[in-house]
Amino acid sequence: MDFRRLTRSELIAAVGGALLALGLFLPWYKPNPDNKNANVNGAREAVSAWDAHSIMRYLLLAAALAPIVLVYIVIRDHELSWPRGEMTAVIGIIAFGLAGYVGVIDRPGDPPGEISLSYGWILAFLGTILIAVGGAWRASTTERPRKPPGVL
């Protein structure tokens, strides 16, 4: 294990994974206190993504672990059939889409217009961006082997 192999891109992705994992347990949705009917999953107080989403919480937690896997691959110098960081970037983009969808387009709670986003969502959303950027940056530094024409 050689930690000197780590570059800035892996560290950016790892920080993004930590932010996403931490953000899952911080408040994401906050009902309007002036509206007595506003609630998220029956709660009138701020709710975390872990409490609000039954399936997506596991998907986002798995996305938060992707940069840790990238760091492990780089430290151990494993050979891959794809550029290092490429899968991490794809997972980061998917997590970005999921977090953006449940934060901007389809917020849980009733009525949705009375539910505001809290600092946990912002932290997690920033984490997804850092995962995607760090993974893409790492993948861009890896040169793909060229194949002759007609070879798949």
Image: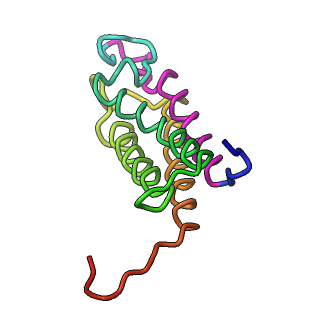
At 49% from the left edge and 55% from the top edge, which residue is drawn? 79
**Residue farthest along the right direction in this orientation:** 4
Please state, as top left, top right, bottom left or bottom right, where the N terminus lies in the image: top right
* Left or right, residue 20 beside residue 1: left
Please state, as top left, top right, bottom left or bottom right, where the C terminus lies in the image: bottom left
Total residue callouts: 0
* Left or right, residue 4 beside residue 33: right
The residue range painted magenta reads: 9-36
**Residue farthest along the bottom direction in this orientation:** 149
At 41% from the left edge and 52% from the top edge, which residue is drawn? 93
Which quadrant of the figure has residue 126? top right
At 46% from the left edge and 27% from the top edge, which residue is drawn? 28
Using the image as rendered, state which of residue 85 and residue 116 is in the foreground. 85
* Left or right, residue 1 beside residue 94: right
Using the image as rendered, state which of residue 29 and residue 139 is in the foreground. 139
Q: How is the image coloured?
A: rainbow
Residue 19 sits inside the magenta stretch: yes
Question: Where is residue 19 shown, x and y percent of the image?
Answer: 57, 34
Using the image as rendered, state which of residue 121 and residue 80 is in the foreground. 80
Q: With respect to residue 113, does 138 lie above or below?
A: below
Question: Where is residue 99 shown, x and y percent of the image?
Answer: 39, 40
Q: With respect to residue 50, does 121 lie above or below?
A: below
Q: With respect to residue 35, does 144 lie above or below?
A: below
Q: With respect to residue 67, does 45 lie above or below?
A: above
Question: Where is residue 31 shown, x and y percent of the image?
Answer: 40, 21
Residue 14 sits inside the magenta stretch: yes
Which quadrant of the figure has residue 22? top right
At 51% from the left edge and 29% from the top edge, which residue is drawn? 21
